[in-house]
Amino acid sequence: DQQVKQNSPSLSVQEGRISILNCDYTNSMFDYFLWYKKYPAEGPTFLISISSIKDKNEDGRFTVFLNKSAKHLSLHIVPSQPGDSAVYFCAASEMSGNQFYFGTGTSLTVIP
Amino acid sequence: EPEVTQTPSHQVTQMGQEVILRCVPISNHLYFYWYRQILGQKVEFLVSFYNNEISEKSEIFDDQFSVERPDGSNFTLKIRSTKLEDSAMYFCASRRTGDQPQHFGDGTRLSIL
């Protein structure tokens, strides 16, 4: 039961350009969304979140956009840096709930 | 910055044996979680724990699994009789309040032989 989907398993971007990672969800009860970054042999690291009352949240080079009607969120990284190369997971939950549902991840490679 | 720590980093166990995975959540956090990630698959929720009891669990978290917070700092996951399909990375997470992001440990790689 894939409640959160990341349809692109990998993405390559030139350094300095924009990286756009996409995520779709099916459960209309989700109202809290997060992006995590994961390096090999490490746990997921929280990057940025957004609640359903907003459609955009920005933190430095990272911006998350939420389109509730399309049940779609995206993470924009501008400008992309080689250190951004990692697997990015989107996750969703109901604010009142405990369980986070993760996507399958997108492996981002930023080419110097 | 405070972090969630997990031990051991890698555990190798014979099928049918009991295994305990240990986690020390961030000290002022109140909600605790276990997730697992089978190689090549997505991160899957196992269980959440709050106020000294399980608050939510998934279908994966059957009678072979149990969690405990024995001393106010550690948070453990026990698998009573391991199966080959329990081989995975197990991540512990914690968060301070219900509207904060979860912070993850680096995981324990469990290998069942």
Image (cartoon, coloured by chain):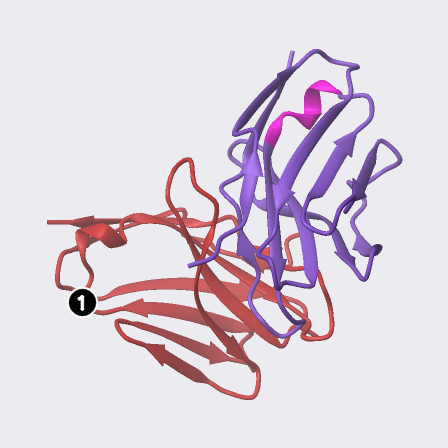
Residue occupied by mark 1: A79
Residue that appears at 52% across and 29% down? B9
Residue B78 x/y as whole percent? 77, 33
Residue at the outermost front position: B71
Q: Is residue A64 above or below residue A13?
A: below
Residue at the outermost right position: B63
Residue that appears at 60% across and 30% down? B88
Task: Decide if residue A10 is on the left or right side of residue A27.
Answer: left
Task: Decide if residue A47 is on the left or right side of residue B4.
Answer: left
Q: Secondary structure at mark 1?
A: loop
Colour purple, chain: B
At label 1, which amino acid type do we have? Pro
Q: Tell which of B2 and B93 is nearer to you.
A: B2
Task: Decide if residue A31 is on the left or right side of residue A111.
Answer: right
Read off the chain for label 1: A
Residue at the outermost bottom position: A53
Colour red, chain: A
Number of numbered labels in the structure image: 1
- The residue segment tinted magenta is B83-88
Q: Is residue B25 above or below residue B23?
A: below
